[in-house]
Amino acid sequence: MSWTPVCTVDDLPRERGVAALVDGRAVALFRTYDDAWFALDNRCPFTNASVLARGIVGTRGDVPFVASPLLKQPFGLRDGVCLDDPAVRVTTYAVRVTDGVVHIGPADPSAHQEVP
């Protein structure tokens, strides 16, 4: 997977997510309140629905997360691990910002999905 431009920094407000089709995969891109950028697989492993981009962005302690809009499971934005069930994880992707353009890159090879 190569780096794919998705949007500009100004296109995505803080504490929000957006879905993007990257190399045939639905990827959820998030911007946190402190302007950090994260990308996860958009599919919720608990419901098999492609909805994580529409989830609620927040923090638990110092861990930024997105809560699935369907069943509210929180997934850490840094590593994709479900905060309520660490055996479940969604794939994470590299993100970079170059000249105001946000790019999504390769998947983390250690971030495999495990479905309960």
Image (cartoon, helix red, strand yellow):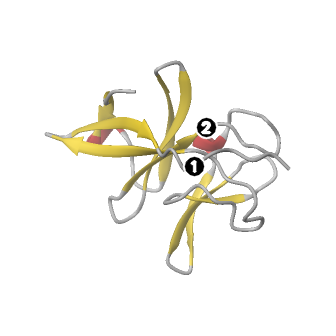
Identify the residue at horizontal 35%, vertical 45% (top origin). 95
49 vs 91, left or right, is: right
Residue kind at label 2, given as amino acid type = Asn
116 vs 15, left or right, is: right
Q: Nearer the viewer, residue 109 or 62?
A: 109
Identify the residue at horizontal 57%, vertical 28% (top origin). 26
Furthest residue in direction top, as rendered: 24
Query: SS at mark 2?
Result: loop
* Residue 54 in the image: above or below residue 21: below
Mark 1 lies on residue: 111
Q: Residue 84: percent from the left, percent from the top?
A: 76, 68
Residue kind at label 1, given as amino acid type = Ala
Q: Residue 22: percent from the left, percent from the top?
A: 46, 25
Mark 2 crowdedness (10 Å alpha carbons): few <14, some 14-19, many ≥20: many
Furthest residue in direction left, as rendered: 99
2 and 1 marks in contact (CB < 8 Å)? no
Which label was assigned to residue 60?
none
**Quadrant where the N terminus is found in the figure:** top left
Query: SS at mark 1?
Result: loop
Mark 2 lies on residue: 42
